[in-house]
Image (spheres, grey):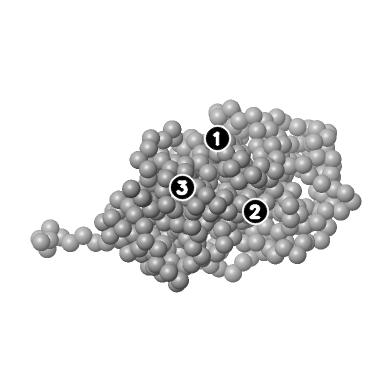
Amino acid sequence: MSKSISVIGAGSIGISSAIHLQQRGWNVTLIDRKEPARETSYGNAGVINSGSMVPLNSPAMHASLASYLKNDKPHLRYNIKHVLKNFSWALQFLQNSKTRKTDKTAQALFSLTSASLDEHKAFMQRAGNSHRLSEKGWLRVYRNEPGFTEDSYDATQLKRFNIPGQKLNADEVHDLEPSLKPIYSSGYLLSGAACINNPGALLTEYAEQFVSDGGTIVKASIQSIESRADRIICRTDSQPVESDQLLIAAGPWSDDILAMLQYSVPLCVERGYHAHYKLENNASLGRSVHDVQSGFIMSPMELGLRITTGVDLDHRDAEPNHSQLKQVLPSIKEAIDLGSQTDDPVWQGNRPTLPDSLPAIGKTPNHDNVWVAFGHQHIGLMTGPITGKIVAELISNEASDIDVKPFDPARYVQSTVRRKPIWARS
């Protein structure tokens, strides 16, 4: 018996979910208004690191809160009107930064990040693009001491989950990355990490393999969704798409799609930017480098040296604000022989974040045939393949090796339908 499913969203999560569903015998249609991997998943540092299980809202953030009040740091900028309008989300976000809560969040996220590299490798083997992966680790560098400290919250979590890494002095940093100028007093190498040389191309190639294996991609905007007991009809601006099941993996637009099914969800975004630059004097980097104190990441990419900035808290559809990128340029030039910007335009994207920094993965509360997978904040590229596996297992009624309870959509996805009082029900 044929079983069909529509997947809304062709980013890392949607593409990965479509592939895993296809491997389980589902007839999958992937729907997106743009070509695959042209939104949130396109722009990132390309890092795949099992140690990326500590969210932004962790106890490590507390010491910096006062310094963020001036709103002039490259690590974080915010539109105060937007923050006040979403004060409930911001308050919950801060409340979830307490140590006990963050410990649980890190445990749940580690179940995803620790499995991500192997899942990507499996996809790469099928798509024939393993050349995009470099397993040389991820380097954090510090201009001022104390640098990486063993008693910091991040350090305790790395130790808790046995994430391999080593502290480096100034000479060791230079030996590892000779093109870095001698401005760094220390570093920390996460030796088990890997880097992708072109995230957008990687995911596009995954999508091409999905189509080659019989999958369908529909480029269209969702206008409305009709839900019946056993069928789902996605009405788009080009053609209706009908299926047995529906998976919403639309990243920062997931709340808009869920609203069509009368759900609300407290989803906000952490906006980010990247730009590509040429390097001069034969400078090069062997791996992604995070200048922790200056608030930027440099990643060697096919398109040039990719510079990614910190978080910009504003509305998803607000005009881009390149102030953080402009602010870090002098610091980057202090660190490496930076040349001119490439012709590739500055990218701006939206990282979908729920108040507890955990994604929503599973079935919606009021529909047996509607599922969600969104809210992966900064780790969507990394955790796409493992998330896709989990949600495909759930939809296919298979047991999962990963505890899915922390990702239950019901904690935030709420029905907006008001039930009639008992006396008014027939």
Image quarter for residue 290? top right
In primary-sequence order, the first of circles 2 and 1 is 1
Q: Residue at x 72, y 63 (%)?
A: 344
Q: Position of residue 348 (x, y in %)?
A: 62, 62
| Amino acid type assigned to the residue bearing label 3 in the image | Gln
**Residue at point 37%, 43% (across, down):** 396
x and y, in percent, of residue 142 in the image: 73, 41
Q: Is residue 128 above or below residue 249?
A: above
Counting residues from the start of the chain, the first of labels 3 and 1 encountered is 3
* Numbered mark located on residue 22 in the image: 3
| Viewer-nearest residue: 329 or 147 | 329
Q: Nearer the viewer, residue 239 or 141?
A: 239
Q: Residues within 10 Å of mark 1 (few under 14, many from 20)?
A: many
Residue 55 seen in this snapshot: no
Could you say which disc has been placed on residue 201 in the image? 2
Residue 221 visible to an observer of this rendering:
yes
Q: Tell us which disc is closer to us: 3 or 1.
A: 3
Q: How many marks?
A: 3
